[in-house]
Image (cartoon, grey):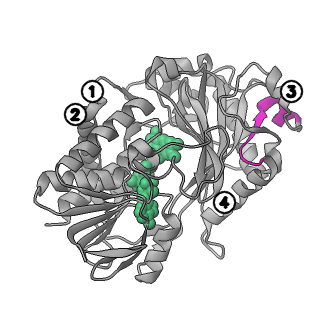
């Protein structure tokens, strides 16, 4: 049986940056990375327009993880994107996110723009309209440059002797440690689990098998909004992404913008066989569209007696898949008039959809409370970006952000089993590229001290 100093499960940003830092600090270490998906150059969605439920989703799995075809927005902030700071402190969390940014810049990202909300005139404008603009700096790599950075990191890791085993899901981790996959197993002194959202079910099983405590996490539910880019360009030109929170008048729920993609594309996302919606955009001017998209999300967290927040989100997403055969699209005007959108209404509308979705009625899918909050927020955003509440604004549903259950970890992101670490989105602690990457660096720096 092969023996390694460190076995990493999952080659998303968490796994990649932990391997990177380990090799930098300890070049002599024998490191293996297991990844259930393909290597980067073999990752290709066979049906980008319509999800065909592949057993292994090429968008979510493979070298680069869920982030490989993302917009590559690295938000440097403790205000959103995860709770890493609760474990390692705010200062260190920011320092590590900046360090990740330096690595990205030295691996193909140089020349990309860093945006910041600091001192922005929009803070006051938002406040005057009951909206709260959160503080952040965001590096926008874009899908194309993000890919180049990943390619460069992969080549460097291979040159330095990191062993990658692709198309190989790890089935079990036994104490000791034995890392088991179909047809074999390896021994390792330390194991770092970085399995992201696509590995959420497997992570739950590992925690059950090894008696690692977990607690339920929240789920975010909502829609993706698509509108002409000019409506938001005064915000996106200056800030690129604005994270704005609105407290609804009716229920006092928080609705927030998420993952803003100027001149971007709306895309399908498949998590454990459930098709939801997401978005991204490219740096390449030839790949830009006339539209901007962003999500509007409401968080729900169930604890007693029902604990399964993700199950709740999954049921709603399944309902939309049942009614629409995938993602549903509806004009805002149709939603407000209480009627479904049809193919002809979408075709006649002034906003050209960038994703082929089924025209339908989101009010048959999303709970009233969530939908009312989203409608209220669209009207609030209309005050700072007039045109947001136009009839032709498109809403795609449902967008769901599943969060893994939170694994009980100590201040070193180590489980109750010494030598077994859990990082990135799979830990429930992070839910962004920058936080997941920073958690990888943190564990690499601390697991041998
Ligand atoms: C379309 C899209 C756009 C996004 N855009 C942004 C953005 O612009 N900015 C941002 O901050 N975040 C974005 N995100 C979220 C971001 O991609 C994730 O937060 C980030 O990738 C988490 O990194 P991770 O390493 O923890 O997990 P992941 O990236 O999910 O990687 C986990 C890896 O582990 C593998 N794996 C799982 N189980 C096993 C197993 N049993 N054995 C072997 N391998 C396994 C998976 O195949 C996967 O490759 C986006 C996500 C999507 C889907």
Q: Earlier in the sequence, mark 1 or mark 4?
A: 1
Q: 10 Å neighbourhood of mark 3: few (<14), some, or many (≥20)?
A: few
Secondary structure under badge 4?
A: helix
Q: Earlier in the sequence, mark 4 or mark 3?
A: 4
* Residue 414 against residue 386 in the figure, above or below: below
Q: Which mark is residue 426?
A: none
The residue pinned by badge 1 equals 110
The residue pinned by badge 4 equals 314
| Quadrant occupied by the C terminus | bottom left
Q: 10 Å neighbourhood of mark 2: few (<14), some, or many (≥20)?
A: few
The residue pinned by badge 3 equals 344
> Measured from the top left, where is residue 235 in percent x and y?
51, 22
* Residue 105 against residue 204 in the figure, above or below: above
Residue closest to the eye, 415 or 420: 420
- The alpha-carbon separation of the residues under discs 4 and 3 comes to 30 Å
Residue 172 appears in the rendering: yes
Q: Residue at x 78, y 35 (%)?
A: 330
Q: Earlier in the sequence, mark 3 or mark 1?
A: 1
The residue pinned by badge 2 equals 106
Look at the numbered discs 2 and 3 and tell me whether their residues touch, using CB distance below 8 Å. no
- The alpha-carbon separation of the residues under discs 2 and 4 comes to 39 Å
Secondary structure under badge 1?
A: loop
Q: Residue at x 49, y 58 (%)?
A: 197
């Amino acid at each position: 049986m092969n023996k390694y100093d460190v076995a990493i499960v999952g080659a998303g940003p968490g796994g990649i940056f932990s391997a990177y830092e380990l090799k930098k600090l300890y070049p002599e270490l024998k490191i293996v990375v297991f990844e259930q998906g393909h290597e980067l150059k073999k990752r290709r969605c066979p049906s980008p327009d319509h999800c065909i439920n592949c057993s292994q989703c090429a968008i979510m799995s493979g070298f680069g993880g869920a982030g490989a075809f993302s917009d590559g927005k690295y938000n440097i902030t403790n205000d959103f994107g995860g709770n890493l700071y609760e474990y390692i402190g705010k200062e260190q969390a920011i320092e590590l996110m900046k360090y990740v940014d330096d690595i990205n810049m030295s691996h193909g990202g140089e020349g990309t723009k860093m945006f910041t909300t600091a001192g922005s005139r929009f803070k006051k404008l938002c406040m005057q309209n009951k909206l709260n603009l959160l503080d952040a700096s965001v590096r926008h790599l874009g899908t194309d440059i993000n890919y180049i950075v990943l390619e460069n990191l992969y080549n460097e890791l291979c040159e330095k002797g990191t062993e990658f085993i692709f198309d190989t899901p790890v089935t079990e981790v036994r104490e000791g440690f034995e890392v088991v996959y179909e047809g074999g197993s390896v021994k390792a002194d330390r194991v770092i689990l970085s399995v992201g959202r696509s590995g959420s079910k497997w992570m739950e099983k590992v925690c059950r098998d090894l008696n690692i405590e977990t607690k339920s996490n929240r789920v975010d539910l909502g829609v993706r909004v698509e509108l002409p880019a000019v409506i938001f360009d005064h915000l996106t030109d200056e800030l690129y992404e604005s994270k704005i929170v609105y407290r609804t008048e009716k229920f006092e729920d928080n609705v927030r913008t998420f993952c803003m993609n100027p001149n971007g594309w709306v895309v399908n996302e498949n998590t454990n066989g459930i098709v939801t919606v997401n978005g991204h955009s490219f740096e390449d001017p030839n790949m830009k569209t006339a539209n901007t998209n962003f999500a509007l999300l409401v968080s729900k967290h169930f604890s007693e007696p029902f604990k399964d927040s993700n199950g709740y989100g999954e049921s709603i997403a399944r309902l939309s898949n049942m009614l629409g055969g995938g993602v549903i699209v509806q004009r805002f005007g149709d939603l407000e008039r209480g009627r479904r959108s049809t193919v002809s209404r979408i075709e006649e509308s002034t906003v050209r959809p960038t994703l082929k979705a089924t025209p339908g009625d989101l009010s048959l899918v999303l709970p009233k409370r969530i939908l009312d909050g989203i409608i209220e927020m669209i009207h609030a955003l209309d005050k700072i970006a007039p045109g947001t509440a136009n009839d032709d604004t498109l809403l795609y549903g449902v967008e769901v952000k599943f969060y893994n259950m939170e694994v009980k970890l100590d201040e070193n992101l180590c489980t109750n089993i010494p030598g077994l670490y859990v990082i990135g989105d799979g830990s429930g602690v992070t839910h962004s590229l920058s936080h997941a990457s920073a958690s990888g660096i943190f564990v690499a720096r601390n697991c041998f001290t």
